[in-house]
Image (spheres, grey):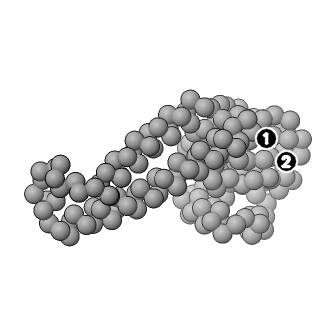
Amino acid sequence: MKNIKCNVRKSIAIILSGIGLLAICFFFAFCNFRQYVDVSLFNNDIVYYLIKAFMVFAFVFLGFGILVILRSVLLYRNKMIEIGDDYLLDNSSFACGGEVRYTEIKSIYIKGMFLCIKLHNEEQFLKKQNFLKQLLMRANKKMGYEYITISDNFLDTNLFEIKKLINEKITY
């Protein structure tokens, strides 16, 4: 069994960047920024309130994202991905696949920044996921990826090494 750990430096850098963006969104969403910025565009009430509404949405979205990243880092930092003898356990993201048996895997390939795992029976696997994961996995599929995608954003091992480790366990 091989555990892929969290890269704490990358995670902290992303979390701090997110907190900085969160602070900017907070300023624009909840403060009267007209008094600090002298731009005639902000004098228009419609534009001003549209910007505030967008920043409230961005604040909530970024806040949720930071909480999800913190959860992953704190709960799974020593076991983001577990490559067992007969299964793969993915905890690397919010839309992670969870536990996947090697007998369910049809193929593995790298596309862009993601390790994509194609399954024999994708719809059956999708039905086992909660509603939010189903939405995220369907969005992955619509963008040309597979339902299960692994990014190395928070991992201490690159995708090529992970693919090699998984391929050693699979019999096609």
- One can see residue 45 in this view: yes
Mark 2 highlights which residue?
87
Mark 1 highlights which residue?
82
> Which residue sits at x=27%, y=66%?
50
> Which residue sits at x=75%, y=53%?
98
- Counting from the top left corner in percent of width and height, residue 39 is at 12, 53
Amino acid type shown at disc 1: Glu
Q: Which mark is residue 42?
A: none
Q: For residue 163, which quarter of the picture?
A: top right
Quadrant (top left, top right, bottom left, bottom right) of the N terminus: top right
> Foreground: 103 or 27?
27
Q: Few, some or many C-alpha atoms within 10 Å of disc 2 (few <14, some 14-19, many ≥20)?
A: many
Tell me the distance, in whole angstroms, between the alpha carbons under discs 1 and 2.
8 Å
Q: For residue 34, which quarter of the picture?
A: bottom left
- Counting from the top left corner in percent of width and height, residue 104 is at 83, 56
- Counting from the top left corner in percent of width and height, residue 136 is at 60, 61
Label pair 1/2, CB-CB below 8 angstroms: yes
Instruction: Assign a secondary structure to mark 1.
Output: strand
**Number of marks in the rendered image:** 2
Residue 45 falls left or right of residue 171: left
Q: For residue 140, which quarter of the picture?
A: bottom right
Q: Which of marks 2 and 1 precedes in the sequence? A: 1
- One can see residue 167 in this view: no
> Foreground: 77 or 84?
77
